Image (spheres, rainbow, N blue to C red):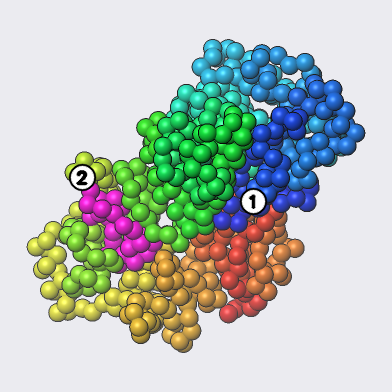
């Protein structure tokens, strides 16, 4: 039995809890490759038991080695290895890729993995190398799919307990990777490894690897973990996690140690090159106990073991660093730091820009960490793309476009002396395109740090700015885009003849940007009251005419968080199915009581929902049941059947509230 749920997220990365046969694994994680013969295992199982919740070993070697096979069949793979947590096994595909043949039948190795008590087995897929003739890639993919179908049928027919990996193949042909992912998804495997990428990583072809990952991910179910087979170098983990990989495995920690290679999160060093350093650039137990010179002076066996231990420590340290970045909402910043370790890694990151429309669907709308610009690649991150799209949600009537000095602090409205009118002031921004004056506090428009840009960086947004102005002209008419003279004349006229509730207008625009609909219409504008903090002077609450709270302004991102009355207002103003999560009858009463909504009760939703948006929980008749923060996006809500879907803020017992 397996369950998988998302606990935290950033980019397409996710911290998840993977429960396999009652054993819990927190993802993303690395599975150290362990040799099935204990005598050939370099790092002690005591250390691996301490660091890892899951390992991977080779069922084919076990099958082909008589004494290992006998022990495994009699006592089980866990006793053979000396590991009582989750054990995953490869099926011999690696040997097939290296030697061109294996002496076992596809279904025979699946049965063997079940017989020895493996937790997660693997089909005997064909790992087609990069750049082969298309005819070969197609033929081998068809054989892999044939074996996959037969393996699943065998598992169901005989009631096997083991879970199965369904490996995505297709060489470097992206359309074949897509086809493989689609067909594997139909077979409902438990975990989806992406295979045959090791040769690409060995050649530093990270661009190809990145495209293979994303073209596979787009067609795999979101509710199943994805395993990047053979990826074991820490410097690639951050990018792979940001693209949606949950599991990694590699023997790199041991193989590198054999060649006196010392892993770091930014690359690989040879012990010979650093032996004259006073200390290692690491504080793991190995590096804290030995100087480079002392380690280099040890005999080959001890040196190899200690280097392997260090390599394993640094590998898990990077995984932990990635998890922390996901929790903080700074995974993109970590990715942009790591990809500068090698030009080819940067090239791999840059190709991701092609797929940002898809990635944006999974990226949270708000984060704990501010947006930090670290290079021209930051221009194309999901936060920027989403903002540019949502600019069109605002209802414009008259617009004044201007620039401000980069020395002006944010949010702009607190530092600019502006006569506030009903004119939308759009401030040109070198990264975000435009920052509307009336929504300048909402994430990420004031929660970002950007250095002075080079001229070529400033040119990036010129096309977007021109296109947006053209859109505005068509939307509101060219005469309503004011130049400086017309704007000055208008504000003088406005000041003398009209009055605007600037705070109410700000709330109205913020809600338009957040939800895409005019929640506070002209009638409500005169009835609401805006409360500012007595200490900071910033917006804090929106009250109705009776003094009841409609919305609270969350301090870290300035999102408007609805109360019960606010949720009812949203429900009235936003048409179905927008911003809805629809639950079945079984969950109705629990939702009304303010209980969280779990994925298995969701029957439909707004497919455009993004993680961490504020949503309405309704039944199939669109009766309002509750309101809260959605954890999953619109795709995931329809695919997940386990874990939290909506963190409910409050239930609606009385529909007339």
Q: Which residues are magenta?
A: 428-454
Q: Which mark is residue 454?
A: 2
Residue 432 included in the magenta stretch of the image: yes
> Mark 1 or mark 2, which has the lower sequence index?
1
Query: Residue at the location (37% across, 39% down)?
Result: 340
Disc 1 is placed on an element classified as strand
Residue at 75%, 50% (x, y): give it: 23
Q: Residue at x 20, y 58 (%)?
A: 406
Residue that numbered label 1 is attached to: 26
Asked if 66 appears above or below 418 in the picture, the reply is above
Q: Quadrant of residue 153?
A: top right
Give me the residue at 79% from left, 27% from top: 62
Residue in front for this viewpoint, 234 or 329: 234
The answer to whether residue 459 is left or right of residue 636 is: left
Density class for disc 2 (Cα within 10 Å; few <14, some 14-19, many ≥20) is few
Q: Is residue 197 left or right of residue 513?
A: right
Indicate the position of residue 525 as horizontal and vertical percent values.
Answer: 36, 77
How many angstroms separate mark 1 from mark 2 (CA)? 42 Å
Q: Residue furthest left?
A: 485
Of 297 and 125, which appears nearest the observer?
297
Tag 2's secondary structure? loop
């Amino acid at each position: 039995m397996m369950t998988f749920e998302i606990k935290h997220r950033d980019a397409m990365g996710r911290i998840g809890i993977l429960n396999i046969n009652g054993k819990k694994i927190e993802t993303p994680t690395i599975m150290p490759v362990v040799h099935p013969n204990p005598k050939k295992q370099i790092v002690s199982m005591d250390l691996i038991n301490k660091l890892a919740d899951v390992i991977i070993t080779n069922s084919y070697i076990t099958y082909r080695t008589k004494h290992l096979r006998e022990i495994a069949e009699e006592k089980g793979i866990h006793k053979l290895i000396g590991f009582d947590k989750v054990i995953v096994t490869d099926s011999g595909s690696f040997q097939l890729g290296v030697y061109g043949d294996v002496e076992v039948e596809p279904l025979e190795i699946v049965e063997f993995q079940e017989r020895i008590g493996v937790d997660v087995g693997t089909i005997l897929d064909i790992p087609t190398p990069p750049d082969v003739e298309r005819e070969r890639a197609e033929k081998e993919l068809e054989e892999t799919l044939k074996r996959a179908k037969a393996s699943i049928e065998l598992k169901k027919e005989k009631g096997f307990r083991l879970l199965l990996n369904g490996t995505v193949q297709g060489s470097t042909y992206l359309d074949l990777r897509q086809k493989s992912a689609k067909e594997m998804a139909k077979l409902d495997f438990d975990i989806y490894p992406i295979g045959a990428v090791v040769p690409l990583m060995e050649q530093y072809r990270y661009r190809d690897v990145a495209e293979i990952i994303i073209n596979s991910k787009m067609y795999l179910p979101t509710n199943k973990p994805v395993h990047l087979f053979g990826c074991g170098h820490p410097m690639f983990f951050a990018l792979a996690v940001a693209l949606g990989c949950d599991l990694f495995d590699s023997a790199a920690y041991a193989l590198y140690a054999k060649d006196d290679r010392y892993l770091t999160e930014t690359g690989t060093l040879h012990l010979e090159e650093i032996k004259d350093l006073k200390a290692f650039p690491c504080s793991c137990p190995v590096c804290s106990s030995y100087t480079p010179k002392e380690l280099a002076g040890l005999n080959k066996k001890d040196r190899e073991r200690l280097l392997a231990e260090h390599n394993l420590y640094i590998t898990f340290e990077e995984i932990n660093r990635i998890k922390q970045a996901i929790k903080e909402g700074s995974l993109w910043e970590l990715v942009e730091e790591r990809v500068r370790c090698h030009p080819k890694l940067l090239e791999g990151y840059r190709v991701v820009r092609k797929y940002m429309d898809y990635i944006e669907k999974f990226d949270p709308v708000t984060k704990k960490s501010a947006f930090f610009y670290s290079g021209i690649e930051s221009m194309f991150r999901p936060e920027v793309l989403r903002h540019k799209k949502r600019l069109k949600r605002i209802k414009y009537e008259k617009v004044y476009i201007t620039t401000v000095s980069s020395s002006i602090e944010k949010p702009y409205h607190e530092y600019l002396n502006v006569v506030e009118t009903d004119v939308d002031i759009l401030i040109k921004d070198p990264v975000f395109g435009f920052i509307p004056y009336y929504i300048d506090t909402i994430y990420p428009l004031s929660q970002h740090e950007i250095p002075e840009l080079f001229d070529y960086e400033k040119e990036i947004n010129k096309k977007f700015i021109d296109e947006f102005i053209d859109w505005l002209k068509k939307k509101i008419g060219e005469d309503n885009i004011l130049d400086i003279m017309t704007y000055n004349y208008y504000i003088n006229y406005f000041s003398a003849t009209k009055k605007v509730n600037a705070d109410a207008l700000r709330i109205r625009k913020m809600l338009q940007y957040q939800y895409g609909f005019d929640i506070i219409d002209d009638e409500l504008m005169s009835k609401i009251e805006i409360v500012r903090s007595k200490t900071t002077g910033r917006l804090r609450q929106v009250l109705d005419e009776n003094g009841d709270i409609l919305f609270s302004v969350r301090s870290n991102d300035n999102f408007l968080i609805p109360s019960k009355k606010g949720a009812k207002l949203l429900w009235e103003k936003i048409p179905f199915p927008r911003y809805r999560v629809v639950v079945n009858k079984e969950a109705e009463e629990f939702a009304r009581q303010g209980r969280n909504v779990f994925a298995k009760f969701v029957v439909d939703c707004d497919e455009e929902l993004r993680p961490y948006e504020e949503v309405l929980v309704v039944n199939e008749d669109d009766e309002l049941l509750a309101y809260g923060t959605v954890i999953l996006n619109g795709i995931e809500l329809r695919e997940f059947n386990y874990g939290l879907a909506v963190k409910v803020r409050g239930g609606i017992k009385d529909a007339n509230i």
